[in-house]
Image: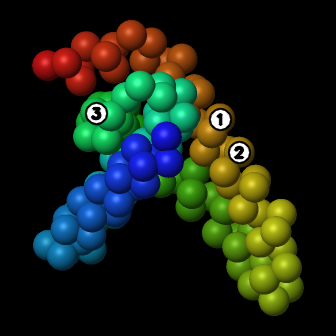
Amino acid sequence: DYSRIFVTKFLQRLYTALWALLLVVPGIIKYYSYAMTDYILKEEPEMKNNAAIEKSMAMMENNRMKLFMLDLSFIGWAILCCITLGIGFFFLIPYVQSARAAFYEDLKAQQGGNVEAKVEM
Protein backbone atom coordinates (compact mmCIF):
# COMPACT_ATOMS: atom_id res chain seq x y z
CA ASP A 1 0.00 0.00 0.00
CA TYR A 2 3.03 2.24 0.44
CA SER A 3 3.60 2.62 -3.31
CA ARG A 4 -0.04 3.66 -3.95
CA ILE A 5 0.12 6.35 -1.27
CA PHE A 6 3.58 7.50 -2.33
CA VAL A 7 2.60 7.87 -5.99
CA THR A 8 -0.63 9.67 -5.09
CA LYS A 9 1.15 12.12 -2.79
CA PHE A 10 3.81 12.69 -5.46
CA LEU A 11 1.14 13.42 -8.09
CA GLN A 12 -0.72 15.68 -5.67
CA ARG A 13 2.42 17.74 -5.02
CA LEU A 14 3.38 17.76 -8.69
CA TYR A 15 -0.04 19.03 -9.78
CA THR A 16 0.01 21.70 -7.07
CA ALA A 17 3.50 22.82 -8.09
CA LEU A 18 2.51 23.01 -11.75
CA TRP A 19 -0.52 25.12 -10.89
CA ALA A 20 1.66 27.32 -8.68
CA LEU A 21 3.92 27.99 -11.68
CA LEU A 22 1.05 29.94 -13.23
CA LEU A 23 0.68 32.18 -10.19
CA VAL A 24 0.52 31.72 -6.45
CA VAL A 25 -3.28 31.92 -6.25
CA PRO A 26 -4.04 28.95 -8.58
CA GLY A 27 -1.53 26.89 -6.59
CA ILE A 28 -3.31 27.73 -3.34
CA ILE A 29 -6.69 26.91 -4.87
CA LYS A 30 -5.46 23.52 -6.07
CA TYR A 31 -3.81 22.84 -2.70
CA TYR A 32 -7.21 23.20 -1.08
CA SER A 33 -8.86 21.20 -3.86
CA TYR A 34 -6.55 18.25 -3.17
CA ALA A 35 -6.65 18.62 0.64
CA MET A 36 -8.91 15.62 1.33
CA THR A 37 -6.87 13.14 -0.73
CA ASP A 38 -5.08 11.70 2.32
CA TYR A 39 -8.33 10.88 4.09
CA ILE A 40 -9.85 9.36 0.96
CA LEU A 41 -6.80 7.13 0.50
CA LYS A 42 -7.06 5.95 4.09
CA GLU A 43 -10.77 5.20 3.90
CA GLU A 44 -10.79 3.57 0.48
CA PRO A 45 -7.72 1.34 0.09
CA GLU A 46 -8.82 0.08 -3.32
CA MET A 47 -8.92 3.56 -4.86
CA LYS A 48 -6.14 4.40 -7.29
CA ASN A 49 -4.01 7.53 -7.58
CA ASN A 50 -5.87 9.99 -9.78
CA ALA A 51 -9.28 8.72 -8.67
CA ALA A 52 -8.56 9.81 -5.09
CA ILE A 53 -7.39 13.23 -6.28
CA GLU A 54 -10.49 13.63 -8.45
CA LYS A 55 -12.76 12.63 -5.58
CA SER A 56 -11.03 15.19 -3.36
CA MET A 57 -11.60 17.85 -6.02
CA ALA A 58 -15.28 16.91 -6.21
CA MET A 59 -15.66 17.04 -2.42
CA MET A 60 -13.94 20.40 -2.10
CA GLU A 61 -15.70 22.06 -5.04
CA ASN A 62 -17.67 24.57 -2.96
CA ASN A 63 -15.82 24.05 0.32
CA ARG A 64 -12.31 25.37 -0.33
CA MET A 65 -13.04 28.69 1.38
CA LYS A 66 -14.38 26.92 4.47
CA LEU A 67 -11.17 24.95 4.84
CA PHE A 68 -9.10 28.07 4.17
CA MET A 69 -10.95 29.89 6.94
CA LEU A 70 -10.39 26.91 9.26
CA ASP A 71 -6.66 27.05 8.55
CA LEU A 72 -6.68 30.83 8.97
CA SER A 73 -8.23 30.45 12.41
CA PHE A 74 -5.03 28.79 13.65
CA ILE A 75 -2.77 31.75 12.81
CA GLY A 76 -2.92 33.17 16.34
CA TRP A 77 -1.90 29.82 17.78
CA ALA A 78 0.97 29.56 15.28
CA ILE A 79 2.25 32.98 16.32
CA LEU A 80 2.16 31.89 19.96
CA CYS A 81 4.04 28.72 19.00
CA CYS A 82 6.75 30.82 17.36
CA ILE A 83 7.07 32.86 20.54
CA THR A 84 7.77 29.64 22.46
CA LEU A 85 10.58 28.88 19.98
CA GLY A 86 8.54 26.14 18.29
CA ILE A 87 7.73 24.04 21.32
CA GLY A 88 4.03 24.84 21.01
CA PHE A 89 3.90 23.21 17.57
CA PHE A 90 4.04 19.84 19.33
CA PHE A 91 0.52 20.63 20.52
CA LEU A 92 -0.73 22.71 17.59
CA ILE A 93 0.00 20.31 14.73
CA PRO A 94 -2.09 17.40 16.12
CA TYR A 95 -4.86 19.88 16.92
CA VAL A 96 -4.89 21.21 13.35
CA GLN A 97 -4.84 17.70 11.90
CA SER A 98 -7.73 16.66 14.14
CA ALA A 99 -9.70 19.70 13.02
CA ARG A 100 -9.05 18.82 9.37
CA ALA A 101 -10.12 15.21 9.98
CA ALA A 102 -13.35 16.46 11.57
CA PHE A 103 -13.81 18.76 8.56
CA TYR A 104 -13.48 15.71 6.28
CA GLU A 105 -16.02 13.75 8.31
CA ASP A 106 -18.46 16.67 8.15
CA LEU A 107 -17.97 16.97 4.39
CA LYS A 108 -18.50 13.26 3.92
CA ALA A 109 -21.69 13.30 5.98
CA GLN A 110 -22.91 16.45 4.26
CA GLN A 111 -22.40 15.19 0.72
CA GLY A 112 -23.34 11.56 1.24
CA GLY A 113 -23.48 9.72 -2.08
CA ASN A 114 -23.23 12.83 -4.26
CA VAL A 115 -19.44 12.63 -4.51
CA GLU A 116 -19.42 9.24 -6.26
CA ALA A 117 -21.84 10.52 -8.90
CA LYS A 118 -19.62 13.55 -9.64
CA VAL A 119 -16.46 11.45 -9.93
CA GLU A 120 -18.00 9.01 -12.40
CA MET A 121 -19.17 11.77 -14.73
Q: Which residue is mark 2?
A: 98
Closer to the camera in the image, 23 or 5: 5
Identify which amino acid the numbered label 2 is placed on.
Ser
Q: Secondary structure at mark 2?
A: helix
Measured from the top left, where is residue 80 in percent x and y? 79, 78
Identify which amino acid the numbered label 1 is placed on.
Ala
How far, Cα to Cα, is label 1 from label 3?
22 Å
Q: Quadrant of residue 87?
A: bottom right
- Mark found first going from the N terminus, 1 or 3: 3
Q: Which residue is mark 3?
A: 51
Identify which amino acid the numbered label 3 is placed on.
Ala
Q: Quadrant of residue 113?
A: top left
The residue at the point 49 percent across, 40 percent down is 1
- Whether residue 62 is visible: no
Q: Which residue is mark 1?
A: 102
The residue at the point 85 percent across, 85 percent down is 84
In the displayed structure, does residue 115 sit left or right of residue 106? left
In the displayed structure, does residue 89 sit left or right of residue 40? right
Measured from the top left, where is residue 61 in percent x and y? 30, 36
